[in-house]
Image (tube, helix red, strand yellow):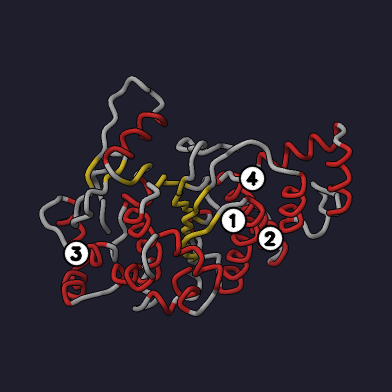
Amino acid sequence: MRRLRNRTRGQTSYYHLISRTVDGEKLLGDPEKEFFLELITQVADFSGIQVIAYSVMSDHSHVLVEVPPIEGEYSDSEIVARYQKLYPEPTNALPYTVEELAELLEENQSEGQAIRAHLSRRMGDPSYFMKSVKQRFTSWFNQKYDRYGPVWGDRFTSVLVEGKSWPLQVVTAYIDLNSVRMGLVEDPGQYLYAGYAQAKNGNPEAQAGYRALGVDFDVYEKLLASSKETDEVLKDRERMALVLTEGNAEVSIQTALRFKIRYFNEGKVLGSPDFVENHAKAFARNPKRERKAHPMHGADWKGLTVGTGLRMNLFS
């Protein structure tokens, strides 16, 4: 399995994870979206990862996660508790009941040691998180529709996000407005397969994710608001996308977020210049090559930068 190249280990980190269906097929209807959301919660509980925001569409998904630092070993009791969340029943790959697993770990013989190492490797890792979600979904989907073959396209893409309030707010707003950009709803609170609508409807798990933003919910919601400017700009989306890409104009952040923006999907690292430069250097294939933070254009992003110098078709 290919691992995240922008993986951090000694600190809490945040990732915007994007997955797309094979060939962009619109494979996910309402039942599939509901099951995908169940899997996100289930696998996150096992992994110890906090889901902050999400949006599941018919052909792709966005998930913003908080990943805890990797520190020391997990206790056997914690491994058993997490195992029970992901494997309430034995499987072919892990044919142990919860009681059998606890006994093997306590005996601490070769089999128990191997299982402990296997499960521990999968905890607190966004690569394993996405792999588990997508594999389980594919198995369920193919069985449901009596088909075989992949459901998802190439491996997921990721953007490392600085763990400060402003970067997290902006990325979350971009995810929450996904359904609006796609033309499915006018109000993001109407799209039930996203964290924002779930939080508005009182879902405690969805509401818990927004606490990571470090601001009151109503303060964050200002990023989702439309305006007269938004209506005017979007009357000629194609022309304005070109203008914004070329850096010839700026619009409000609220308006800019209603465009598809490559910074959020392909920027590699997103945050303040110092954060981006430090991590871009650490993750570079060629450490001798100079790495710099690239300012985001099209709006006053309040100092946000990305780790790649994207130029073409930034907005669409």
**Earlier along the polypeptide chain: callout 4 or callout 2?**
4
Q: Determine the CA span between mark 4 and mark 3.
A: 39 Å
Secondary structure of the residue carrying numbered label 2: helix
Q: Determine the CA span between mark 4 and mark 2.
A: 26 Å
Q: In which quadrant will I find the N terminus? A: top right
Residue picked out by circle 4: 123
Residue picked out by circle 1: 151
Q: In which quadrant will I find the C terminus? A: bottom left
Please tell me whether mark 3 or mark 1 is closer to you in this view: 3
Residue contact at pointers 3 and 2, CB within 8 angstroms: no
Residue contact at pointers 1 and 2, CB within 8 angstroms: yes
Within 10 Å of disc 2 (Cα), the crowding (few <14, some 14-19, many 20+) is some
**Earlier along the polypeptide chain: callout 4 or callout 3?**
4
Amino acid of disc 2: Asn
Residue picked out by circle 3: 252
Residue at image coords 61%, 62%? 41
Please tell me whether mark 1 or mark 4 is closer to you in this view: 4
101 or 227, which is in the foreground?
A: 101
Q: Determine the CA span between mark 3 and mark 1.
A: 37 Å
